[in-house]
Amino acid sequence: MTQRQTAGGDVRLTGISKTYGSFTAVRPLDLTVPQGSFFALLGASGCGKTTTLRMIAGLEEATTGTVSLGGTDITGLPPYKRPVNTVFQSYALFPHLDVTENIAFGLRRRGIRSVKKQVGEMLELVQLGDFAHRKPHQLSGGQQQRVAVARALINHPQVLLLDEPLGALDLKLRRQMQLELKRIQTEVGITFIHVTHDQEEAMTMADTVAVMNGGRVEQLGAPADLYENPRTTFVANFLGTSNLIEGEVVSAGTKGAGTDIVVAAGGGRIRLSAGRCPAPVTSGGRLLVGVRPEKISLAHADEAESITDGRNRVTGRIVDSSFIGVSTQYVVESPAGKALQVYEQNIERDTRLVPGAEVVLHWNPAHTFGLDAGQPMDAGVESVEDAA
Amino acid sequence: MSVTDAPPAPDTGPEVRRPSTRRRLVPYWLLLPGILWLLVFFALPMVYQASTSVQTGSLEKGFEVTWHFRTYWDALADYYPQFIRSLLYAGSATLLCLLLGYPLAYLIAFRAGRWRGLVLVLVIAPFFTSFLIRTLAWKTILADGGAVVDVLDALHVLDVTSRLGWTENNRVLATPLAVVCGLTYNFLPFMILPLYTSLERIDGRLHEAAGDLYATPATTFRKVTFPLSMPGVVSGTLLTFIPASGDYVNAELLGSTDTKMVGSVIQSQFLRVLDYPTAAALSFILMAVVLLVVTVYIRRSGTEDLV
Amino acid sequence: MPVLRLLRRNLVVIAGLLTLAYMILPNVVVMVFSFNKPNGRFNYAWQRFSLDAWKDPCGVADLCGSLSLSLRIAFWATLGATVLGTMIAFALVRYRFRARGAINALIFLPMAMPEVVMAASLLTLFLNMGAELGFWTVLIAHIMFCLSFVVTAVKARVMSMDPRLEEAARDLYAGPLQTFLRVTLPIAAPGIAAGALLAFALSFDDFIITNFNAGSTVTFPMFVWGSAQRGTPVQINVIGTAMFVIAVAVVLLGQLIANRRKSRAGK
């Protein structure tokens, strides 16, 4: 058996870019994916994430830059000489071969004769033992997906590339497969690079997420970090929902010293920790203040006195509410913003909170983040809808 | 872990890779033999034929290019009846093919159910017997005193067709009707298969949707089915009309000297009379007429994605 | 009236079946007349039942010779046209190159040209080159007019093929040649087979182009043509019937095997 698993296999992209004629799909970008990690490239369609993946696979020739794997430059190698395998979008299972031969394809091409044992193990891993002799068209979407994973994993690649692997599945199955892929990755310990437009999928599965937009990486980090501390409006809007409020800086605060930034917006004052604002702040300058909908509490205007001091508050009027089981989502019109989103857990519902009610929105200043006001406030908003 | 936008490219720029020359030449190597074949044995002969059509001379002394364009005029003056007849017969046969073929294509696409495969086989199967043998069979079917002629005669159909000039003296064989009947028969599969292909692509739910939106079956056909089958109608009529217009087998086997088509003339000028310039000129005129008809037809029907 | 309504509902079916009858009728006549014992040289009128022709299908001079010549020409023409046409189809679908429009036109035109025009012009070329008419000129002509049909058939199949399948093969350690042999060719095979079958049928049954370019060589359709002038032996009907029966049997057998395989795989 030719086990190809070797130690020390970071994927390193250096200045890699791709242009088609005058169109730039990927701008020169540097990226390192450590060995054994589950890495997600997240972005809307056309952001260059798939092209980046294909350059790692060798299916696309990079216009500039290099790809290296565990310190070896593989830029010039054709795909069939790279120790990298891909799970394709809509799987690309060979329609003329049965499940066994699909899975054994890579081994056979490398001249391995006795494939039975390995194929059997793989079928066990992806729980498809009974389907060895079916043709791809006789399998369900979820089963095809697992065959595609098995077909790639049996080669013990140093890196497994997944190109929107769950895109063709329905929501329930997608959830199930997310957990299963995560399980498999933990079991085999191979580096997974996963391309997706689904932010929830990226956050559920990956240790590290790179958010791509317009051919470049906007931000990279652990899912929770990206969610809590977005550095651009695109990331703030593309990952979940953000309420962005523009205001004037009253007090600039200082990082580290623990003094807060104070921003005047919508007739009130909003405080945020200086450590949570990556943008340069000057007194009198503009700043975007952001807060996630689930961090906000909603109180009827009559109860305004009962809100603890020190919390950020914004007044407004409910214009819309929708009940979705675990929570109720409110849209609030306020001087600070036309359509602020608030998600309230359905624990003790205040029956006065109906459209038309005057309310106060309040939240912990620690949950507030700041962004440079020089960027479009709605970047990344439409992209989510397009992708869905 | 790190991510940074790479520094702006220096003036010299990083090395930009281009696809290798060998890879870029692959399509040309794939195309070369086949295209060369078509150039030498299809396009080049057209050039030779064009040159032959303006030559004068005789078989004994040899032919020479004298730019003798009169040949075209003479050929047309001598053989215009055969030309008109060819277009007329081919046009009638095409129309008949459409009228006869559409119901059968529709039947296979929507009504045949589990018999679909069998009916398709039956449509294609006659192909496997040489078309000349099958055309000769029509001599038996349409023979004087045969069942077909007797029935048509008894129903007084032949009186009508004789008055129209399609048949003569209560016989069918050796009349225009026989030739058109043979042409229709021979090219029907060329009409049915494209019709079937485009009908088969129509989503059956469209019929239900039309019915749901208050269309009667007839309206559904006129407003939904037929327009959607247009690509099949266009390619079917072309695949029928083009070969029918140049055909001489049916005219020779089922017709008489009064039903000769232009194909017969070209064939006899080329192979028997050995008047090459006239034959070449006639062939060129036929080609021009057919290409003209095809171009106008494709333009008017608005389906240019036939190829 | 229920009968009338039934008729009207099934008008399409009735009209379609009548057309089908029209198409099948000559084959029935050919078959019936293969058992005829005609008076005189022509086999157009029924006389009496006889198995003579079936017992001695090659009993007419040159008939079986012309048949084997036609089969040989059809075989080589199919091979040539299929190889060349498949190559063109792949180039058209998979690559970018210059002069695509001109090449598409060159492939389309032979299909949009009356046969007699191609036949006459090709003969002019052969006469000008002083080529000796016979097997080779016929073969050249057949490859030429079959080529476009093969391209069309294969192109349709290759176009519907997911290019990711080949990428998947390359990703799974198959080099260019392996990718072609193990993935591309098997998946394109039905299209190539359809093109080849069409080429064989067209070549075997061609009369007009062959008649112009065969010289004194006689293929099977030319033999039939000649006999229509001199006298039609019953053996022609025997050959026609045999070809029909064999072809239908092969098709039905193929469908049967495909059905059985499908139902077995479904278990």
Image: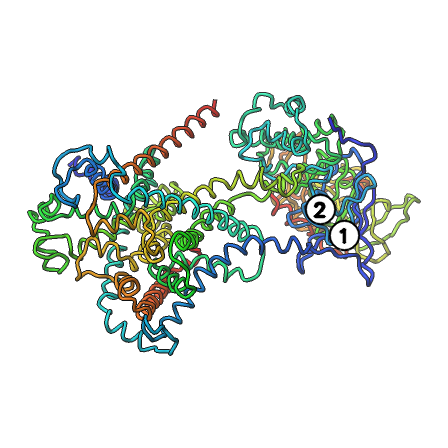
User: Depth check: C127 or B288 in front?
Assistant: C127
The residue indicated by pointer 1 is: A265
Question: Looking at the picture, do discs 1 and 2 lie on one chain?
Answer: yes
**Which residue is the site of mark 2?**
A55
B144 relative to B228 in the view: left or right: left
Q: Residue A374's quadrant in the figure?
A: bottom right
Tell me which residue sits at (31%, 40%) in the image. B125
Under circle 1, the secondary element is strand
Q: Which of the colour schemes (rainbow, by chain, secondary structure, one colour) is used?
A: rainbow
Residue A166: image quadrant is top right
Badge 1: how crowded within 10 Å, few (<14), some, or many (20+)? many
Identify which amino acid the numbered label 1 is placed on.
Ala
Can residue C54 be seen in the rendering of this structure? yes
Q: Position of residue C172 (x, y in %)?
A: 66, 36
Please state the horizontal and vertical placement of residue B272, each as a whole percent of the image.
27, 63
**How far, Cα to Cα, is label 1 from label 2?**
46 Å
Tell me: A322 left or right of B84. right
